[in-house]
Amino acid sequence: MAKTKTSFICQNCGAVYTRWQGKCDACGEWNTIVEENAAGGIGGGPARARRKGRVASLLPLSGELEEAPRIVSGIGELDRATGGGIVRGSALLVGGDPGIGKSTLLMQAAAALDRNGHRVVYVSGEEAVAQVRLRAQRLGAASSGVLLMAETNVEDILATLAEDRRPDLVIIDSIQTLWSDLADSAPGTVTQVRSGVQMLIRYAKASGAAVILVGHVTKEGQIAGPRVVEHMVDGVLYFEGEGGHHYRILRTVKNRFGPTDEIGVFEMSDIGLREVQNPSELFLGERNDKAPGAAVFAGMEGTRPVLVEIQALVAPTALGTPRRAVIGWDGARLAMVLAVLEAHCGVRLGQHDVYLNVAGGFRISEPAADLAVAAALVSSLSGLALPPDCVYFGEISLSGAVRPVAHAAQRLKEAVKLGFQRAVLPSAGSDLPKSRDVLTHEIETLPHLVAAVAGGEGRS
């Protein structure tokens, strides 16, 4: 009898070793390597016999184009994040911290799809059917026709789905609880997760039903399990939010059928998630106009303009090495802006602690926030408040020049809609939109901004 082969697989990154060791050399994590049966999983074991290859069809690249059929949920923020709706036959992976609201969002989406005449199956591997019904009753979705299933075996789930009429959407909550008969390891291991996801994706492609998979995240904020799962699915969505704030952001990081820079904004309440149609009003709701060190940044998240407040505090330090604390922005980007201010503008911050915060817990990734950050820093250092009706956006280069950014028209339009009358932005020449509703102040270099802020130009 042949000896059973085993391998040791890291549960964090999926690296395979021939023997056990305490630390994974690939990802650096400790105590994540688990012994698993190498013969388990799809394509393994005695059932893997040689067979003759099947001849596939070769089709030309040029041909008739058809729009991907989508399932519109009716929840505008969810449809925006997915690129206009969920594509039939696709597989989406939704990740987020525990308790952030993933199951709440998907239950509300399932109820909305049922009201629109779609057949939805909700498979729960973490809760019993009675517990899911209690949550649905709290969300006002108990009267919907969503079909429930409390099952964790992948073969049983697929057999149940094939028994009746094909559903339009299948929600799996969550992939860490799935297990397959083809794998001998425990549920939640790399082999089980990979095997279960592969079988569900194969079902989605063959049947045309859309599948949404819920995944837990690690302490680093990444979806737990092998990273190959993110490459297998058609879209990856992250549900983000801070514990001290009542809003949630659904951010798209991968989408084969739409843009990857869209976000959906929700507000958490005692009866579920509520859509936020205008996020700018949410992030500027508790703004103090007269406080120094606060600048309003006109940013873009995908195709949506968002206005957020950037707060800076510059205070003298008694430490040998001043502190640099950043929340909601890139710390390396802040260090660059501080270096440019000191090198080209003569703003000395070497003996000051610098604290930077994006109000509301919002995260900014685009470099267009450089100008607003610089204005907030100079305002805090000088103790002079910025104009309350002014917005800032522009990218700062290492030479001190202020470079133009894209979508200036949308940024200014959003600012005017919220009552802002002035804007400080890079000099864009003829490309800058002319508007009577907003007074634009174009600057070419960072010293011009420092002189305007410290001199109090345009301050009311």
Image (cartoon, rainbow, N blue to C red):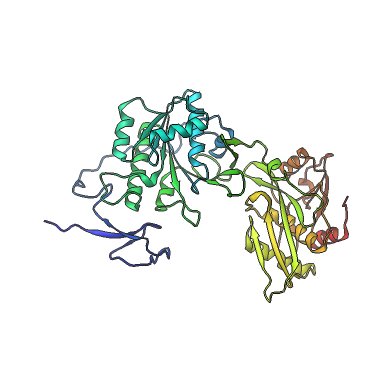
Residue at left offset 67%, top offset 74%: 321
Asked if one can make out residue 87 in the rendered structure from this viewpoint, the answer is no
Q: Relative to the observer, which residue lies in front, 73 or 273?
A: 273
Pinpoint residue 32: horizontal percent, then vertical percent: 37, 61
Outermost residue, bottom direction? 320
Pinpoint residue 448: horizontal percent, then vertical percent: 83, 60
Q: Is residue 389 left or right of residue 124?
A: right
Residue at left offset 71%, top offset 65%: 354
Q: Relative to the observer, which residue lies in front, 252 or 245?
A: 245
Pinpoint residue 150: horizontal percent, then vertical percent: 36, 36
Q: Is residue 144 left or right of residue 264?
A: left
Residue at left offset 76%, top offset 46%: 431
Q: Quadrant of residue 373?
A: bottom right
Pinpoint residue 456: horizontal percent, then vertical percent: 87, 57
User: In the picture, which quadrant includes the N terminus?
Assistant: bottom left
Q: Is residue 270 above or below residue 218?
A: above
Number of numbered markers: 0
Asked if one can make out residue 431 in the rendered structure from this viewpoint, the answer is yes
Q: Is residue 160 above or below residue 434?
A: above
Q: Is residue 426 left or right of residue 108?
A: right
